[in-house]
């Protein structure tokens, strides 16, 4: 069936010793360069998508605006080379890119695990280092595998709202992404030839039709992936691909509802903001409740005033705001954590407020938004010129025809066209328009 290797230690008739540092320990008949290359190719395409959408997600924060409010990633230096003013249209762009980032990332978890399984004998290569070139390659693999674990772990911990990062999530995930991407680029360069050869060695279509009795190990390789004394197969390659693909699909089905909404939202069992909360008219996810942020009914009662500051200062009550021209826009809240929801918001245009503050369009540099919240994060935001001037960006007073509920930001909240959710400040107390 398959030729035993010529190495003297391998005797296929003998039960191998249980020592993972011996190649005879690893006996799956499915491991081999073809399988690893197929999984690697899926990861390469998927992770490139995740990396690019991740970079866009960072750009969406407009981190160049007022440093410490929009950006907690210090000293990014050249890594911020690509930053640009995040556009306000199309209004669903961030919802799309961040939805892809989180969903594709999650769906790749089973593929990553399968890929690591497929190369695990190499972790136990003995002796671990045979040449300087191999030492460098193994070090880059450490960054690759370590980087992958780090990025997946920090990403998943963050979307599960478990904020345990001493340095803050953004800085850790951002730097980790660059380390991982660098290691991946090296890995691709080193392995490209092998992968192309391996992919050409078998046809996917044929493998998907091969039955168990016809499943044969890949021919002996010099990469240490193919088992020198394989067990008889208990599963086809088709079965393995179906298992991994099915796992990815299951993850997708159990999370996609948090992004696309509709009936699937109830199926988003793996997503903490998958379900719905609130009353009939504002039955959409609440990220941080008023109670959690320490916002009281007294603060948001009749004494509440919005401080509008520019060339002149004003104090506006909710009634004053409702007396200004009202506009209704259908806009998403798209959270960095991957969930999103589209609602009909009604309120005052941000640019009308800038006007009231005596800051004409041509002089406007940015807006600084503050909320009643004291501490705890997400209570302030800097908005860029294009975000303030876009006629669809609102200080919302109502949603779906009803007053905002306290949890959704009553008395007033910002809704920016195509902004990341975190800049849609709730319980706004002051807006400063800078020139
Ligand atoms: N003051 C304040 N505004 C806030 C937040 C907050 O914690 N405090 N959370 C932000 C985040 S991260 C998101 S995604 C949206 C969520 O809005 P929602 O809770 O109405 O769905 O509000 C944003 N506005
Ligand atoms: Mo968010």
Image (tube, helix red, strand yellow):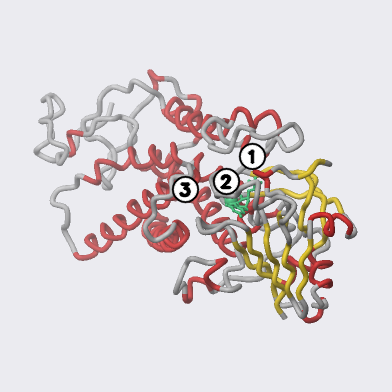
Q: In which quadrant of the rendered view does residue 192 lie?
A: bottom left
Looking at the rendered image, the quarter that the C terminus falls into is bottom right
Q: Residue at x 52, y 48 (%)?
A: 46
Q: In the rendered image, which residue does mark 1 sit on?
A: 285
Looking at the picture, how far across and down is residue 392, in whole percent? 81, 58
Q: Secondary structure at mark 3?
A: helix
Number of other residues with Cα within 10 Å of mark 3, as a class: few under 14, some 14 to 19, many 20 or more: some
Q: Earlier in the sequence, mark 3 or mark 2?
A: 3
Relative to residue 36, is residue 253 drawn left or right? right
Taking depth in this image into account, of 46 and 152 the one nearest to the observer is: 152
Q: Residue at x 44, y 40 (%)?
A: 109
Q: Are marks 1 and 3 in contact (CB under 8 Å)?
A: no
Kindly report the distance in space between the C-alpha atoms of the residues bearing marks 1 and 2: 9 Å
Q: Secondary structure at mark 1?
A: loop
Kindly report the distance in space between the C-alpha atoms of the residues bearing marks 1 and 3: 17 Å
CB of residue at label 1: within 8 Å of ligand 1? yes
Looking at the picture, how far across and down is residue 122, in whole percent? 25, 45
Q: In the rendered image, which residue does mark 3 sit on?
A: 158
CB of residue at label 2: within 8 Å of ligand 1? yes
Number of other residues with Cα within 10 Å of mark 1, as a class: few under 14, some 14 to 19, many 20 or more: many
Q: Secondary structure at mark 2?
A: loop
Q: In the rendered image, which residue does mark 2 sit on?
A: 288
Looking at the rendered image, the quarter that the N terminus falls into is top left
Q: Nearer the viewer, mark 3 or mark 2?
A: 2
């Amino acid at each position: 069936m398959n030729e035993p290797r010529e190495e003297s230690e391998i005797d296929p008739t003998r039960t191998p010793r249980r020592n993972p540092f011996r190649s005879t320990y690893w006996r799956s008949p499915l491991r081999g360069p073809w399988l690893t290359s197929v999984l690697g190719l899926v990861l390469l395409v998927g992770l490139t998508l995740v990396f690019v959408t991740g970079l866009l997600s960072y750009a969406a924060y407009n981190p160049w605006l007022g440093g410490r409010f929009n950006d907690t990633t210090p000293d990014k230096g050249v890594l911020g080379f690509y930053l640009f003013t995040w556009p306000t249209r199309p209004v669903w762009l961030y919802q799309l890119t961040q939805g892809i980032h989180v969903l594709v990332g999650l769906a790749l978890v089973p593929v990553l695990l399968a890929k690591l399984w497929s190369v695990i004998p190499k972790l136990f290569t003995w002796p671990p280092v045979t040449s300087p070139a191999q030492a460098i390659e193994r070090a880059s693999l450490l960054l690759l595998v370590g980087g992958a674990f780090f990025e997946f772990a920090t990403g998943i911990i963050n979307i599960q709202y478990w904020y345990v990062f001493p340095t803050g999530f953004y800085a850790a995930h951002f730097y980790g992404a660059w380390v991982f991407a660098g290691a991946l680029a090296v890995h691709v360069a080193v392995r490209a030839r092998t992968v192309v050869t391996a992919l050409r060695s078998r046809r996917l279509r044929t493998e998907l039709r091969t039955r168990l009795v016809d499943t044969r190990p890949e021919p002996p390789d010099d990469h240490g992936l193919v088992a020198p004394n394989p067990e008889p197969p208990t599963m086809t390659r088709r079965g393995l691909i179906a298992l991994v693909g099915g796992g990815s699909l299951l993850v997708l089905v159990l999370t996609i509802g948090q992004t696309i909404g509709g009936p699937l939202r109830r199926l988003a069992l793996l997503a903490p903001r998958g379900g719905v909360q609130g009353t009939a008219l504002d039955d959409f996810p609440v990220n941080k409740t008023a109670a959690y942020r320490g916002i009281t009914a007294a603060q948001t009662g009749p004494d509440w005033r919005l401080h509008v500051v520019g060339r002149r200062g004003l104090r506006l009550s909710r009634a004053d705001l409702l007396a200004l021209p009202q506009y209704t826009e259908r806009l998403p809240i798209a959270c960095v954590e991957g969930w999103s929801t589209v609602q009909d918001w009604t309120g005052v245009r941000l640019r009308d407020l800038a006007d009231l503050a005596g800051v004409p369009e041509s002089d406007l540099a940015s807006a600084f938004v503050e909320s009643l919240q004291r501490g705890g994060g997400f209570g302030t935001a800097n908005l860029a010129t294009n975000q303030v001037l876009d006629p669809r960006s609102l200080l919302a007073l109502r949603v779906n025809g009803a007053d905002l509920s306290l949890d959704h930001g009553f008395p007033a909240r910002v809704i920016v066209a195509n902004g990341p959710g975190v800049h849609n400040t709730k319980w706004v107390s002051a807006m400063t328009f800078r020139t």
